[in-house]
Amino acid sequence: MAGAPYPEEHKASLVADLCDVATRYPADRELREMIDELRRRSEEFARLWASGAAGHHETTRKTIDHPQLGPIGLDCDVLSAHGSDVRIVVFTADPGSEAESKLRLLSLVAADDRAVSAEDDA
């Protein structure tokens, strides 16, 4: 987790969410192995895991630090179906905002990258 462009509270929230999942699925061997590996490889993850906090990761605002476009402030909604473990994370930008402009630019850059990749594969 070191070097990840996330604020401390975001990291803590993600680890707490994973802790909640691990509590609900204690017999999931692959999940347990992934958590053990994260604890071995990341002192920061191990510290956050040791806190024992568990909960659902639901925040309202995130800043994504894009390497070419810089910070992009987005609203974040976590949608879940009652009685299901399935969750969808939706990021949106305010209409007319700088963040919306950056997302539009990013979609053009991504489309261009895909076109170049397709040409290389041909």
Image (cartoon, rainbow, N blue to C red):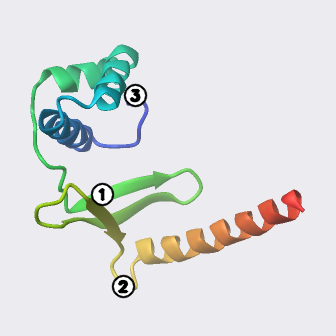
Foreground pick, 103 / 13 = 13
Could you tell me which secondary element the residue under label 1 belongs to?
Answer: strand
Quarter where residue 63 is shown: bottom left
Which residue is the site of mark 1?
A: 62
Query: Measured along the vertical axis of the image, is residue 9 above or below residue 117?
Result: above
Which residue is the site of mark 3?
A: 2
The residue positioned farthest toward the right in the image shown: 122
Which residue is the site of mark 2?
A: 95
Q: Quadrant of the C terminus?
A: bottom right
Locate residue 79 relative to residue 23 in the image: left or right: right
Q: Are marks 1 and 2 in contact (CB under 8 Å)?
A: no
The residue positioned farthest toward the bottom in the image shown: 96
Locate residue 30 relative to residue 104 in the image: left or right: left
The residue positioned farthest toward the front in the image shown: 27
Image coordinates for residue 89, horizontal then vertical, percent: 31, 62
1 or 3: tag closer to the N-terminus = 3
Q: Amino acid at mark 2?
A: Pro
Q: Amino acid at mark 3?
A: Ala
CA gap, disc 1 and disc 3: 18 Å
Q: Are marks 1 and 3 in contact (CB under 8 Å)?
A: no
